[in-house]
Amino acid sequence: MSAQNSITDFLLERFIIERKKFDRSGIYAYTQRLLAYNSNKIEGSTLTEEQTAALFDSGMLPKSDSFYRAKDIEETNGHFLMFNKMLDTLDKPLSEELIKTFHYDLKSGVFEDRVGGYAIGDYKKRPNIVGMYPTARPENVPEEMAALLDWYFGQKADIQILGEFHARYEAIHPFQDGNGRTGRMILFRECLKTGITPAVIRDVNRSEYIEALKEYREENRTEKMSLLLKAEQEFYFEKCKYFM
């Protein structure tokens, strides 16, 4: 058995056991905190690693002289729920409906998005851009997402293919908000399902991540994404070994 397969087998087993036991000291809790902190931080969350951990462990935030932004707390809690939904649905193939479910868990408790009239658990209803880059128009999203999934299921998944899937998903930008976080959760999930070490994209590598997405949008290439994901695999692999 390869090291990558043994790591994913270990993760799948421990995630299930530790979650059922409400264990906050093992790889399940570590991964929940790591993913939620970094994925939200990439999108501008003001919560620290310590605050994210406290929110996961106790549902409370440490006393602070600064203010907490409600949306950051709501989206962090939503991310914890989305991770659990990801675990609960690993037996299902990736689908548009499943991706919408991830988005619903992430965003259903976010007051600001609901007041703003954002579609929650459904594709965007308004055009949006990423920086200066146009994304798929709302009326084209279902067709483009169906084509993306058709392409994906025709491939033999490895980290390069998953990197391309992620870049293409982010270029479509199917939701009004929450595209990066749902996309990175899908990336983690599909690594688990295909038996390769998951990649957790960290905020410290945000610049490299943005450049990798830019490379795909401008040149239709994913070399930078593949290099980044391989480095992030190595990071997470080393962290996992501590718990084995």
Image: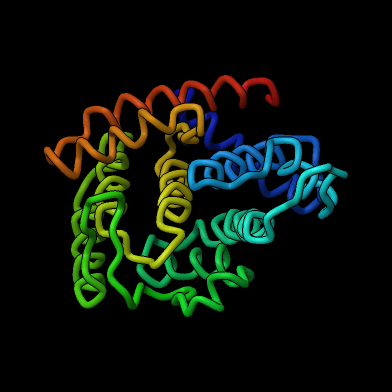
Tell me what residue is drawn at x 75 percent, y 45 percent.
18
Give the residue at x 73% y 47%.
17
On screen, 165 above or below 203? below
Which quadrant is home to the C terminus? top right
Q: Position of residue 47 (x, y in %)?
A: 67, 44
The quarter of the displayed image where residue 129 is located? bottom left
- Comparing 231 with 190, the one in front is 231
Q: Position of residue 209 (x, y in %)?
A: 36, 34
Left or right for 52, reference 58: left
Asked if residue 133 can be seen in this view, the reply is yes
Instruction: From this view, report whether residue 132 is shown above or below residue 136.
Output: above
Residue drawn at the location 41% of the way across and 45% of the way down: 187
Is 66 placed left or right of 127 in the picture? right
The location of residue 86, given as percent across then percent down, is: 54, 57
- Image quarter for residue 64? top right
Q: Residue 165 versus residue 62: which sits nearer the camera?
A: 62
- Whole-percent x and y of residue 168? 24, 50
Q: Residue at x 32, y 47 (%)?
A: 166
- Please state if 127 lies on the left or on the right of 105 as rendered: left
